[in-house]
Image: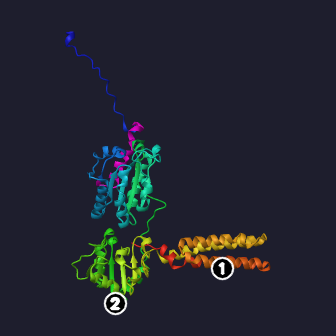
Amino acid sequence: MNARNQKKPSRRTPARPTAKPAVAAPAANLRSGAQCVVDGLVENGAEVVFGYPGGMILDVFNLIGAAPIHFILPRHEQGAVHAADGYARASGKVGVCLVTSGPGATNTVTGLATANMDGIPLVCISGQVPLHMIGNDAFQEADILGITRPITKHNFLVRSADDIPLVMAEAFYIASTGKPGPVVVDIPKDVQRQMTAARRPEAISIRSYNPDVRTDLAQVAKLAEAINKAQRPVLYAGGGVISGNAAPELLELARRADIPVTTTLMGLGAFPETDPLALRMVGMHGSFAANNAVQQCDLLISVGARFDDRVTGRKADFATHATVAHIDIDRSAIGKNIRAAYILGVSTWQYLLLSFIVCGVFAGLTGALQVTAVYHRLLPSISSGYGYLGLLVAMLINFQAIWVAPVALFYAALNIGSIQLPITLKLDSNLAGVLQGTLVLFVLLSEGFRQRFTRKV
């Protein structure tokens, strides 16, 4: 055979045999932090993302094109966050925007404040300078967590790629449960480039966040009785009706009980304005019929509304003839602007039980320490501080600062009397514990504390 016709051996390195999955290298399961962000968007149901690229978020932008996500490029970060807000309002899903650090993140502030005020589910993912540069006034660095803390439901600064899958899941969970709201996830550039094997948890459980949306059936029955007795009831519907997909129930209630309906600006669309019971929008820019009906009604039923000043005007003159019923998923909104007679929230027995437990603990602690002080021949003033502590906690929970001065004077008189009568010191000390516990109980059972522990769907 001619040597020229012989086939020369290949210089390429022979292909390695394919490894079996059982013995695959651990590095095969690693993902970058940026890939975790994109996978987190897909895993949490994001279908549309609005964003504007920048240097500190480019690692995510380089990967998002390969994901099954419809990406929309606006001309400004503010356009991205407002578009995500509008998408959430129209679809009922969580809106997502993706921006870079510094001016990119600060351009989203107005949109985040809007979503927070109106209860719109929104997740804003922002790039950030590397961890070691945070706080050094680096190029395009801004403390977006500090800036957005008052105008978001929650925000995160991710310090490790291992945390990204969990943080992404928690961000979507917090944004969409309870009263919806915006959540900011700030991810430094070096964290986006870290490698991790972490995966999304199967279930989300946040110890400090457990939204309770149970309904107090006893309060529902009382409200139903009040509706049956009312001569001129009016339904006042807000954006919560739309967010809660409760428009069909609102329509059924209005027609069954023959109650006229007025809406806020946020509540437009919750009730058909062509219906004979529709009074249209109420407030400064509302109809004459709606405002007149609210002022003349004897029962005003607020559903998913916050009694905004554009609606109430001067609070002292708002619906002066009406008994107010407030239905809202956000317990902090109940009674904040207008005091409500009917509050649909946590069961009354739970509130009373909590009150008695707290009172019992502090009263028992106070009494025991008073007796101990007497046994060791100490003045009651040494242990009476614990009684003050119990009362202080009760007042802080209740935010009833009006009781501070009279109660303090009463305590001072009690302690002075105990010191002046050393013969009856033991009796006075035990009595002091009982009276301290009673005062704590009185403060806890006042109306303000009850409203702090109520919430409603």
Type of the residue with mark 1: Phe
Which residue is found at the position 40% from the left and 36% from the top? 25
How far across and how far down the image is residue 42, in percent?
Answer: 32, 52
Vertical order, 56 against 422 (above or below): above
Front-lying residue, 399 or 432 = 399
Numbered tag placed on residue 231 in the rendering: 2
Instruction: Please report whichever mark, 1 or 2, sits nearer to the chain's N-terminal start.
Output: 2
Q: Dot 1 corresponds to which residue?
A: 410
Q: Are marks 1 and 2 in contact (CB under 8 Å)?
A: no
Residue 408: quadrant of the picture = bottom right
Count of number-bearing discs: 2
Q: Please state, as top left, top right, bottom left or bottom right, where the N terminus lies in the image.
A: top left
Residue 274 appears in the rendering: yes
Asked which secondary structure carries label 1, the reply is helix
Q: Is residue 69 left or right of residue 407?
A: left
Does the magenta segment cover residue 266? no
Does the magenta segment cover residue 31? yes
How far across and how far down the image is residue 431, in percent?
Answer: 70, 79
How far across and how far down the image is residue 79, in percent?
Answer: 29, 56
Residue 255 appears in the rendering: no
Name the image colouring.
rainbow
Vertical order, 375 against 198 (above or below): below
Q: Please state, as top left, top right, bottom left or bottom right, where the C terminus lies in the image.
A: bottom left
How far across and how far down the image is residue 183, in percent?
Answer: 39, 58
Stretch of the chain drawn in magenta: 23-49
Front-lying residue, 410 or 71 = 410
Q: Nearer the viewer, mark 1 or mark 2?
A: 1
